[in-house]
Amino acid sequence: MITEAIDFRYLLIENYRKLKLNENELATIFVIDHLISQGNPFVTADLLSLKMTLDIKEIDKILAKLLTKGMFEYKTIGKNTVATLEPLKQKLYREFQLFLSKEEEEKSSTRIKEELENVYTNYEKLLGRSLSPVEVAKIHEWISFGYSDKTIIDALKEALSKNKKTLRSVDKILLSWSQRDDLQSEGHTPLSEEWDKNLEETIRIAKIPWINKD
């Protein structure tokens, strides 16, 4: 997984405040990770105190808090008990995944907004008038189906070249292009599958006189 390729220490620095860890707990976690990586499977307060300036009683309290918070645990493997920061790492990886998802959503939202604005601007220019709310909703639907702004604009130009100015005509052109592309690729695209699943709705939409009859 991509998240597991990210150094958890980096993720820890970025998120320790969000996880409500203080600096002493942060330092203790780093030393625990160091000791485990050095081949010390059973990490105790006594062992940590050899590497830290904190009092052993304070270290013991920190270990107890980390155990309570579910960020550190002792596991029994065979006949041996080992220390692990795996619970903390999983928390950090989940936080990173949420961050990536949110970032992707924001990028997608920005891209869709830009494509919509491009289509609106070009349609109003080509039609020589403002778009109606129904037309705006239809264009948004095309974008959501996966048509690019360029394809939608080209479809209107194609309709206008045939002296047709309704979105119904554009809708037919987009559908025909999609079917053509499916045949050329000798398969099924997500777009055509979506139309197949919603055939009844597609027919209903095609019957609506969006502006004037051709």
Image: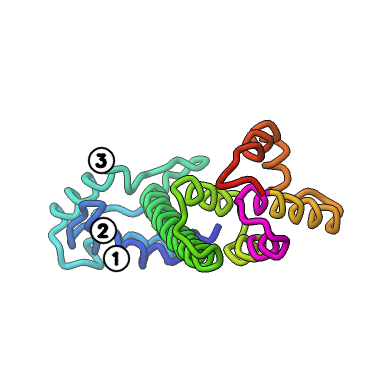
The answer to whether 178 is drawn above or below residue 79 in the figure is: below
Q: Secondary structure at mark 3?
A: helix
**Can I make out residue 63 in this image?**
yes
Of residues 110 and 85, the one drawn nearer to the viewer in this rendering: 110
Q: Earlier in the sequence, mark 3 or mark 2?
A: 2
The answer to whether 151 is drawn above or below residue 174 in the figure is: below
What is the magenta range?
156-171
Give the image location of residue 21, x and y in percent. 21, 54
Q: Amino acid at mark 2?
A: Tyr
Give the labeled residue for mark 2. Answer: 16
Q: Secondary structure at mark 1?
A: helix
Q: Earlier in the sequence, mark 1 or mark 3?
A: 1
Give the image location of residue 174, x and y in percent. 69, 54
- Main secondary-structure element of the magenta-colored stretch: helix
Label pair 1/3, CB-CB below 8 angstroms: no
106 relative to 201 in the view: left or right: left
Q: Amino acid at mark 3?
A: Thr
Label 1, label 3: how far apart the Cα atoms are? 20 Å
Instruction: Spot the residue most to the top.
Output: 200
Q: Secondary structure at mark 2?
A: loop
Label pair 2/1, CB-CB below 8 angstroms: yes
The answer to whether 117 is drawn above or below residue 82 in the figure is: below
Give the labeled residue for mark 3. Answer: 68
Give the labeled residue for mark 1. Answer: 13
Does 115 lie within the magenta span? Answer: no
The residue under the point 86% across, 53% down is 186
Q: Amino acid at mark 1?
A: Ile
Label pair 3/2, CB-CB below 8 angstroms: no
Does 157 lie within the magenta span? Answer: yes
